[in-house]
């Protein structure tokens, strides 16, 4: 039969899958492997169970020694009482409807940050800024938060943070006076 006839014959009857035959020595080897597996699994399980039991006894002994610590027995009720007191104080503070004490901040009118046209500050002369920053430093050193100072002076808290980052020391800078001299 020629190759063309054989090809046409397979085309007519369709795809025929080839049957895979496993040799007997492979099946015997797989059976031996399964037999060994069934014998060794129970033995390995017993070993694992014994190890788990040993670990559990060790853990129980460690827990008993930890629980029998006399210092812990003495400190535990004290710590729980401190926690109760702290919770009670927090609740009492939350119940008070009184206003939070805001310190009285003095803001001189001549040093106030004045907004001019287009949101620009009108009083940025060196002397005014130096006096303003010295007041901010005194208020900050008195324990007043930056946000509270900024709210009283009606400016951004970043301005006060900038003054603090410069050590509360204003520098003459390149203002209008310096530009005019050039």
Image (cartoon, rainbow, N blue to C red):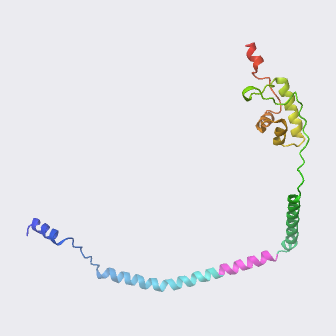
Q: Position of residue 90 (x, y in %)?
A: 86, 60
66 drawn magenta: yes
- On the image, the x and y values in percent for residue 52 come to 62, 80
**Residue 53 lies within the magenta run:** no
Q: Quadrant of the N terminus?
A: bottom left
The answer to which of 56 and 78 lies nearer the viewer is 78
Number of callouts: 0
Tell me if residue 49 comes above or below residue 77 in the rendering: below
Residue 10 left/right relative to 142: left
Residue lying farthest to the top in this orientation: 181
Query: Percent x, y for residue 153?
Result: 84, 35
* Up/down of 30 relative to 85, above or below: below
From the viewer's side, name the closer residue of 46 and 15: 15
Height in image: 111 above or below 14?
above
Tell whether 14 sits left or right of 22. Answer: left
- In this view, the residue farthest toward the left is 1
Residue drawn at point x = 70 percent, y = 78 percent? 58
Quarter holding residue 67: bottom right
In which quarter of the view is residue 6 placed?
bottom left
Q: Residue at x 25, y 76 (%)?
A: 19
- Judging depth in this view, the residue of 49 and 113 nearest the camera is 113
Provide the major secondary structure of the magenta segment. Answer: helix
Quarter holding the C terminus? top right
Q: Position of residue 105 (x, y in %)?
A: 90, 38
Q: Quadrant of residue 148?
A: top right
**Looking at the image, which residue is at 10% across and 68% down?**
5
Is 12 placed above or below 94 here? below
Tell me where the magenta segment starts and ends, as one range.
Answer: 54-68
């Amino acid at each position: 039969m020629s190759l063309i006839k054989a090809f046409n014959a397979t085309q007519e009857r369709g795809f025929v899958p080839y049957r895979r035959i496993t040799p007997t020595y492979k099946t015997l080897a797989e059976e031996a492997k399964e037999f060994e597996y069934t014998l060794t699994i129970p033995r390995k399980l017993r070993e694992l169970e014994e190890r788990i039991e040993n670990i559990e006894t060790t853990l129980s002994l460690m827990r008993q020694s930890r629980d029998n610590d006399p210092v812990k027995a003495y400190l535990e009720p004290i710590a729980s009482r401190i926690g109760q007191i702290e919770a009670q104080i927090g609740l009492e503070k939350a119940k008070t409807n009184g206003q939070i004490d805001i310190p009285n901040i003095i803001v001189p009118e001549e040093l106030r940050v004045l907004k001019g046209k287009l949101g620009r500050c009108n009083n940025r002369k060196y002397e005014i800024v130096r006096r303003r920053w010295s007041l901010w430093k005194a208020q900050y050193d008195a324990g007043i938060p930056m946000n509270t100072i900024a709210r009283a002076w009606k400016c951004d808290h970043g301005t006060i943070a900038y003054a603090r980052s410069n050590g509360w020391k204003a520098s003459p800078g390149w203002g209008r006076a310096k530009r005019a001299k050039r």
